[in-house]
Image (cartoon, rainbow, N blue to C red):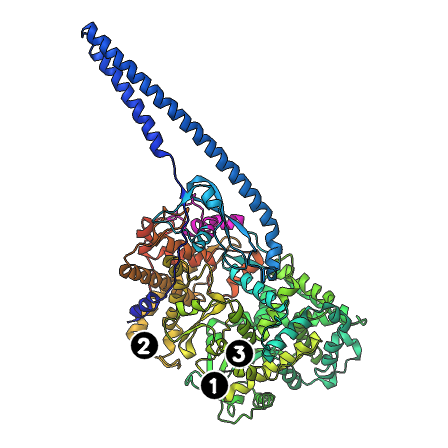
Amino acid sequence: MYLFLVRFTLYFIATCHSVAPLSITQGIGDTWLDYYGCASDHGNLWIAINEYKQISQAQLDNLNEKVNQQKETSEMLITKLNALVEENNELKQTSQAQKIQLDNLSQKVSEQEEILARQPQLCQGRTNYTQWKPYSWGSYGITVHVDTSHCGFQTVPAYFTSLGVKDTNDVCLSPYCIKAANYLLESIDETIDPCEDFYQFACGTWLKNTRIPPENGKHRSTSRLTIRLENALVDFFSTSPPQNDTVEPRAIINARRLYDSCMDEDAIEIEDIDVILSLIKTEFGGWPALEGLTWNESTFDLSRLTLKLNEYNNFILYTIKSVADDKNSSVRSIRIDPSHFLRENLMHFKKGTEVRNAYYEFFYSLTEALTNDWSTIDDDVDALQNFELEIAEKLMKHDKLSFQNIVRTTVGNLSRTVNSNFTNYLRRLYLFGNVSLVDTDIVTVYAPKVLLDIMSIIDQQSPRTIQNYMIWRFMINRALNMPKRFRNIVQQYNYVFYDTTGSQRRPIICANYVNKMMGLAVSKIYINKYFDKDIRKGVRVMKEKIGYPDYLENDDVMKLEKDYADYNFNSSFMSNVLSLLQLHSKQGLRIVRDPVDSKDWTGLLPTVINAANGRSLNEIVFPAAFLHTPMFDKDAPRYLNYGGVGFVVGHEITHGFDSKGLEHDMNGNKIPWWTNATIAAFDERRKCIIEQYNNYTLKQINLRLNGERTQNENIADNAGLKQAFFAYQQWTKTHKKLEKKLPGLTKYSTEQMFFLNFGHTYCEKMTKQSAYSYIMTDVHSPSQFRVFGPTSNFVEFDRVFGCKPGQGNSRVDKCSVW
């Protein structure tokens, strides 16, 4: 039933196709055949003469006359042939000249691309705007150009007809197919045998020619989705509403104000740090590192400090969320986890001395820039370092089971699980969201032993050390919102921690910030102005969340306005930032009394480049910003879409049947629904996957993967690839018309193209520091193993590429869970 569901689901991934008639250059093969035919006949005739030397002179003279006639005929043919050859050479020279001319044009365009990419608004209202990009064209070595401007595809250039390019029946020459052929030709390395290393085959050229942007620790082929989204948002926020436009919703007006306050760096510099320092002093109890010996230890109150930081949505030691209840997913309960800050502490020590030194240099630089009293900073840093080292050592002593342990209790009984003060603290926190907790409210505590150990360490520290630590963790993120000299301090630390060498442009930073803090308002902007709604219709296969919530598509903005009724911004960026932190904290708390809405999109916003399986709601989510090339396009051949978004659909559905999915029933409730025999068979099969990935080593940093931690994602990768491929096969059975191939890639079958696009979507490069963080913390395997692992286990991959079990990319003993 499961396999049928996945195949049935993927089978109905609809796409629209339109092929623009173009052409390819005809060769002159027939002329060369004629030449060799003439030469052959001429030689045979002389053989015949030798065989008849004994015939009469008259007959010989007669024959010689015929031979001479044949010679003249042959010479005439050779003369014509030479003329054709000369004409062909001239054509080659013309083509080469055209190629040089076009390449020169391409080079000039390349010099403008970065400017154009950063100023997409230049396209607005200009229907004649053109941006040419080069595409390799088959075996002729000709570079042709197709309009792929930000303003959309225009008519295909006349270069095609001038080069003698004509259409064929089995090659797709639509604008999209040419674009797809380009990104794949610029990705694959045909010197690599796909049966030996399919990842290098699919990504080798991309890996060779791609540079990681200086502001990022990694770069992936699908990063183009992020760039597309960021440019679209900058385009919107940096242009005023058209004069003939109707009045914008208040939520969008406030989103613009927030962006403008972020972009006004002069105002940020003038305001300086007064707002943030006032908050620390009046509400948080001060920062000892800034106040030196004048800080009054007797005023320290950990409960009050933690509560105030939580009100600004900063959960330093543990996180508190209102989430769908495990046992009854239609209502919400409270969830308590160890904070991600604790994991960051651990990474600072695991990454080694250079990173650890950079981290504390960050503290030195930031505090020294905020105060003239440096008398206690050395001692404060030493105490902070010892405290964080103790936390890291304690975390490393806990095994996997400690972090997986879950205690379900109530507010009234919480003190038995955590400590006696926590119940009162939790009640006070939820009052900030206008919610009065009762003793029977459900609380789920994750990793309670870890939390208790952290609290015991805190009890042993001085008030000064804890106050320094809590304010320091708050300020790490706030420094990014402060004047430039403080942002530069953060950047110096990031250079070491992530191995980066640059920072993002301010418009991108501000657009991303607004998107993060006002996601649904930004989504309204995005889907109305930049998203093709036909895409949503094309991939809607069941009642899953595809693209965006329905109400954002409507002119009625009442719900949007209600969601953002409390959002009001002014020209002070830091004031806006602090206001947003409080708003987000309140919203996260007060929803605990709201029933769970299966149509709610707050978990994964439409403007997020990702997809997800929501186990508590038994749903899969595909945001609008994710549904673009190379994942999906309504004009793409089906083999590309099935190899792109089809794989992701299969992957996300499979999460409903992994070691976490087996715990959730059809309603998302955490109730076992598998038989013991099924669980035993599943456990036996997943051992194979765990062992397989445990034996993979990321050579860049010489570290092995953690097959245990990544098992669910690996299971989903392996099953997702199979089901997407089987779904594509099912589609081809009912659509007998052969899909057209891509130019320059005609030697590959459509099934091979399915795998090529799948592989391309995982082409990725990382810096060493980013690779280390990824392999130590992420639940996914590094990209190369997300390609290598599933293809090595798939017999259909072997068949399609003619691989033999035991070759580099084909396992003899294949692992298969589903």
- For the residues bearing labels 2 and 3, Cβ distance under 8 angstroms: no
Label 3 SS: strand
**Magenta run includes residue 208:** yes
Q: Where is residue 319, by image quadrant? A: bottom right
- Point out the image quarter for the N terminus: bottom left
Residue 810 appears anywhere in the view: no
- For the residues bearing labels 1 and 3, Cβ distance under 8 angstroms: no
Q: CA distance from mark 1 to mark 3?
A: 16 Å
Position of 707 relative to 276 (above/below): above
Q: Position of residue 744 (x, y in %)?
A: 41, 46
**Magenta run includes residue 117:** no
Residue under label 3, please give it. Answer: 337
Residue 559 appears anywhere in the view: yes
Q: Nearer the viewer, residue 201 or 56?
A: 56
Residue under label 2, please give it. Answer: 674
Residue under label 1, please give it. Answer: 332
Category of crowding for the residue at label 3, using alpha-carbon neighbours closer than 10 angstroms: few (below 14), some (14–19), many (at least 20): many
Please, what is the three-letter code of the amino acid marked with disc 3? Asp
